[in-house]
Amino acid sequence: MTRDADAHCVDPNPLRSPRGLRAFRRALLDWFDRGRRSFPWRDEPSEYRTVVSEFMLQQTRATTVLRHFDAFVARFPSFEALGRATDEEAMAAWSGLGYYRRARTLRAACETIAREHGGRLPRDPAALLALPGFGEYTAAAAGSIALGLPLAAFDGNVRRVVSRLFASDSGDRELKALSVELLDPARPGDWNQSVMELGATVCIPRAPRCDACPVRRWCAAAADGRPESYPPAKLRPAIVEVRETAVAVVREGKVLLVRRPEGGAFAGMWELPRADSRDRDDDALAPRRVLIDRTGLRGEGFREIGGTRAAFTHHRIRTTLHLCAPARGERPPEEGGGASRWFAIGELPGLAAGKAQKRLFEAIARALDEKKKSRSGG
Ligand code: SF4
C-alpha cells in the first residue's frame, strides 16, 4: 500500500484500540522530540518558570511572551520574590502582555505557594486547583509539565486537534474526555505540550498542514478530506464600535490619573479620566463633563491633541484625547494614594497601565514637548 493510500485507509476509531493508541502517542512524541520549539521556559525549566509561562500564554501569543518572559523572571526570580511584590509592581512588570488581571492573580498564587506550600507547587491536583488563578487548564498544564502529574490540559489548540482526529462535532465536555483518553501517562507534560504544539504549528485553524502532520494516518477529519469543518464554528457576537473621550488635566508638569475600580478589566490600574459611549449619552462624552464626572474638576483651556484606536475581542474603541488645565482658583483633588493621583510625565511609562493608555501618555508627552518648544521659540 502506498503511503498516500495508507493515509486515507483509516480504521473506524483506530485511536480506541490500545495498539493504535500506543503507535499514535509514539508518533506524536517522536515528532515533538525531534522538532520542539525552543522557549526559555522549556530550555531552562523550573516550577516557577513553568507557572509564569502558563499564565502569560493563557491569552497572549508565544512570540509576544518571548519578548517579555526573561525580563519578568529576572525582576521576580521566584515564587517568594513575586509573592512579596505589590499588585502594582507585578502589573508594571507585566506591561505589554495585556489582560492585566493575570498579573494580580499570578502574584496572589505565588504568595500562597510561598506561604502555604514552602515555595513549591503542591503535588495534589485539588490543592493546585485551589491556588488563585489556577483553573482546570492551568492546573493541568503546570501540574503535568512541572510535576509529571497525569493531567490532560485542554485549551483551544487541543480542542481543535481532538475534534479533527475523531471528526467529532461534540461539545467541549466530550472532547475533553477524549483528550484524557489520548494522554500519555508516561510523559504527560511532554504529551500536553506536543498536542498544543501540533495545534499551534500544523493543525492550525485555517488550511491545516495535513501533509506535514505526524499523526495524519490516525486522523478521521483528514481522511474525510474536510479537516477545516472541525471543530464547528462557534457563533461570535457582533463587534461593537465604541467612542471614548479621555482628558489629560495638567498642572505644573503633572497629569492627574484615576485608578480603575476593582473587579472589572484592568482592575486597580491607572488611567486618564475617561468615559465611553457604552453607558453614556453624547453629552456625557464632552471633555468638560468627563473631567467633572471622574474628578470633580471643572478645567479650562480644553483642546484636542490626538487619539488612538484599539481592538478587543468584542469591541473597537476610538478614543479622542483632550488636554486642559485646572480652572483658575480651582483646588485640585488630594495627592497621594487612593482613587486619583498626580504623576510627573516621566513617571507615566513605568506605571501599571494598559497599552492603549500608554499610547495616550506618549501623545501627552509629545504635546507638552511641542508646547515647551514653541514657547522657547525652538
Ligand atoms: Fe490536523 Fe490535518 Fe493532522 Fe488531522 S491530519 S490532526 S487535520 S493537521
Image (cartoon, grey):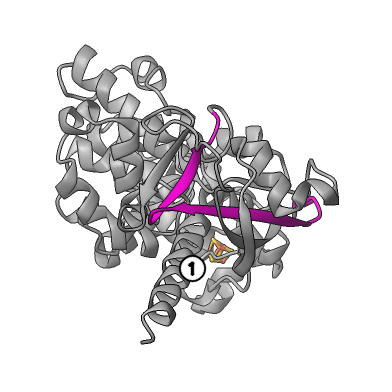
Q: Main secondary structure of the magenta part?
A: strand
As drawn, 298 above or below 143: below
Look at the numbered disc 1 and give the secondary structure of its residue: helix
Point out the stretch of residues depicted in magenta: 234-261
| Front in this rendered view, residue 161 or 332 | 332
Q: Is residue 237 magenta?
A: yes
Instruction: Tell me which residue sits at (64%, 32%) in the image.
Output: 173
Where residue 354 appears, as percent x and y from the top left, is: 48, 51
Relative to 137, is 86 on the left or the right? left
Return the residue found at the far top.
116
Which residue is tagged 1?
363
Q: Is residue 75 left or right of residue 330?
A: left
Residue 19: image location, x then y, percent: 43, 45
In this picture, is 336 found above or below 273?
A: above
Q: Give percent across and percent down for residue 204.
A: 55, 65
Q: Which percent across, then down, holds residue 119?
A: 16, 23
In the rendered structure, does residue 258 fall within the stretch colored magenta? yes
Among the 4 quarters of the image, the one containing residue 62: bottom left
Amino acid on which disc 1 is placed: Ala
